[in-house]
Image (cartoon, rainbow, N blue to C red):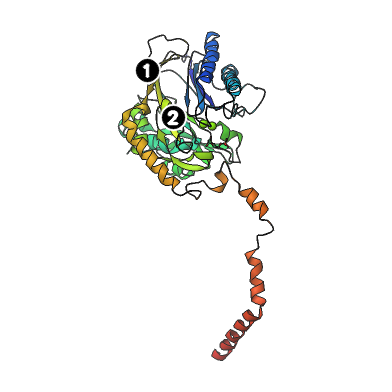
Amino acid sequence: MSAEKVTVSIIKADVGSVVGHARPHPSMLDAARNVLKDAQKAGTIEDFYVTRVGDDINLYMTHYKGENNSDVHGAAWECFQQATKIAKKMKLYAAGQDILTDAFSGNVKGAGPGSAEMTFEERGSEPLLFFMADKTEPSAYTLPLTRIFMDPFTTTGLVIDKRAKQGFDFEIQDVMANKKVVMSAPEESWSILSLLGDTTRYAIKRINSRSGIGPAAVVSTDKLNMTAGRYVGKDDPVCICRCQSGLPSVGEYTQPFLNNTMLVAGWMRGSHIGAFYPCSPEDSDPTYYDGPPRICCLGFQLNNGKLQGLEPYGAKNGEHIPVDFFGTSTFDEARRNAIRASKFMRSQGPFVPSILGAEEMEYTSRPDVLKELTNRFVSLDEEKPKKASSKKAAAKKAPAKKKKVEVE
Ligand code: F6R
Ligand code: MG
Ligand code: MG
C-alpha cells in the first residue's frame, strides 16, 4: 500500500495595501496567522507559513486533505476575510480587491484568490522552493521553467542525472480556448516551445517527472481559467517546486534568475513589459513605477508534512524561518540588470513594446477614444472611386489608352 500523500498548497490574494499597491499591513498578516493557527489546531492543516510579495498575501499550507479541499480553501478564504476587515478599518488601498464573491462556495477558484497545489508521496528528504511574483502573469514562469526543465545548456542535470534525463511532462494551458494539453520533453521540446513562446495564450500549469517521482512544479493560473477566452488582468502568480534527487537541484532552479534578465508582462497598470527583479520578500515593495515585476524564492524542507526552515525543530504557530534565496548579495547583479532593463523599456513611453499589445492591456482608454471618433473616421476606400471619377484622373487615363493604340 502506498504511503499517505501530502499536499502542499499556496493560496494567495491581494486584499489591500498600505500606500497604493505596495504592501499589506503587518496586522493583516497577523490576522491570517491567527486563522491558520486555529486551522492547524483543528487538524485541517498540518503546518503553515504566512508571507507576502509586494501587495499579495501568500499562505503556504501543508495537509493531508488533497487538492481543492473545501476546509483548506475555507481556512484561506477566512484569512482573506479577516485581512480585508483590517484593510477596510484602516482605509487601506484596494481593500478586499481580490474577493470577488460574497459567499464562499467551497473553493477559492473563480472567487478571486489564486492557488497552486501539488500532492505527492514525501520522499526520504523533500526540499521545496516557493516562488512568488508580483505585478505579472502566470506565463512569466514559462521562460525560467523551460530553461530549467528543457535546456541542457542551463541544467546539466538533464544530461548527467539518470532520472532527470528521462524527461518531464508539461501540462500546458491554452488560456484563450480554456483547454490543456500534456506534452513531453525532450522529444517534443521544439513543439512545446512553439506554443509556449506565445506567452499571451499559453502557460505552464504543471510539470511532472517521467521517472516516477511525481509532480515537480505547479503554477497558479486560476484567474486565467476563470476568464478563459478573454484576457483580463495579471495574476501575481506563485509556483511550488520540488527539488533534488532526480529533479532539478535548488541551484538549477535559481540559476536562470541570475544568468538571464527576463522581460515579463504586467508592471504598472498590468499593461507594461518590465524585467523580473529577484529579491527578498522584505525588499519586494514595488517602488519603481509600481514595480518592476518582482520575484521571491523561499525554501523549506518538508518533514512528515511539516515545514522545516532555520527555526528550531518543532516550531509552532507557523513561526518558521525559510531560506531566502534571492535575498542574498549573489543576486545584486541580477537586480541591477533588472533595473537597467526596466529603465530602458520605460524610455519607450506609451509605445509598444514598453506597453502591451491592445488585447493584453489591463487598462485602456482606446474603446472610448474610438467611440468619440466614430463620425470623424473616413474610409480610405471611399476616397478611391472619387479620385478615379475626377476630371483630372480621367484626363490622365486617356492619353495612356491612346499610347497603347499607337504601339499596336
Ligand atoms: C498593477 C497594479 C498597479 C495599479 C496602478 C493603478 O498590478 O496593481 O500598477 O494598476 O497603481 O491603480 P489604480 O487603478 O487602483 O489607481
Ligand atoms: Mg495589487
Ligand atoms: Mg500584487
Mark 1 lies on a secondary structure that is: loop
Q: Nearer the viewer, mark 2 or mark 1?
A: 2
Category of crowding for the residue at label 2, using alpha-carbon neighbours closer than 10 angstroms: few (below 14), some (14–19), many (at least 20)? many
Q: Which mark is residue 125?
A: 1
Q: Position of residue 220 (x, y in %)?
A: 51, 30
Picture quadrant of residue 214: top left
Q: Position of residue 89 (x, y in %)?
A: 60, 21
The C terminus: image quadrant = bottom right
- Disc count in the image? 2
The amino acid beneath tag 1 is: Ser
Does the closest atom of ligand 3 sit within 8 Å of the Cβ of label 2?
A: no
Q: Position of residue 359 (x, y in %)?
A: 57, 46
Residue at label 2? 284
Instruction: Choose between 373 and 110: the one closer to the eye.
Output: 373
Q: Is residue 249 visible?
A: no
Instruction: Choose between 60 and 207: the one closer to the eye.
Output: 60
Instruction: Choose between 282 and 239: the one closer to the eye.
Output: 282
Identify the residue at horizontal 66%, vertical 81% (top origin). Answer: 391
Does the closest atom of ligand 3 sit within 8 Å of the Cβ of label 1?
A: no
Q: Position of residue 120 (x, y in %)?
A: 46, 21
Identify the residue at horizontal 41%, vertical 24% (top origin). Answer: 298
Identify the residue at horizontal 50%, vertical 31% (top origin). Answer: 237
